[in-house]
Image: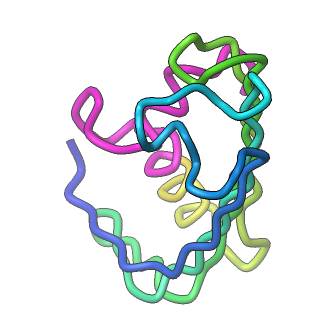
Amino acid sequence: MIDWYIKANELANCNCDYGCPCQFNALPTDGTCKAAIAFEFVEGRFGTVKLDGLRAVMLLAWPGPIHKGNGQRQLIIDERASAEQRKALEAILTGQETKEMGTMWWVFNAMCSTR
């Protein structure tokens, strides 16, 4: 596994009532889950690849609660990222370089059948 770390500003929004029921073991407000999460990486590296200053967005949608799966995920990675940086951010944001259940990204990726 590649050694990595990130420090980022995050802005997240979902279609549920205030407090995001998913984070409190409750079902989504209207039965579905749709979210947009944006990241600005203040500091970071993936192995020797620096990620400082890059941005990424993740769009997510599930027809029911996240844990029931069958979701859709779309990554949008900063156009300023080099091919190496793009590959690194994709690995992080899809949970490829973490232990099973180790990050929210691993969970989101596992619960999405359309990527």
Image coordinates for residue 109, horizontal then vertical, percent: 54, 29
- In the depicted structure, whether residue 52 falls above or below residue 63: below
Q: Is residue 48 magenta?
A: no
Observer-nearest residue: 59 or 15?
Answer: 15
Image quarter hosting the C terminus: top right
Image coordinates for residue 77, horizontal then vertical, percent: 71, 62
Name which residue lies at 68% across and 12% down. 70
- In the depicted structure, whether residue 47 falls above or below residue 45: above
Observer-nearest residue: 47 or 94?
Answer: 94
Name which residue lies at 63% across and 62% down. 83
Name which residue lies at 48% across and 57% down. 88
Judging from the image, the colouring scheme is rainbow
Name which residue lies at 58% across and 25% down. 27
Query: What residue span does the magenta drawing correspond to?
Result: 91-115
Image coordinates for residue 73, horizontal then vertical, percent: 72, 34
Query: Number of labelled discs?
Result: 0
Q: Is residue 11 left or right of residue 24?
A: right
Q: Is residue 112 magenta?
A: yes
- In the depicted structure, whether residue 90 falls above or below residue 18: above
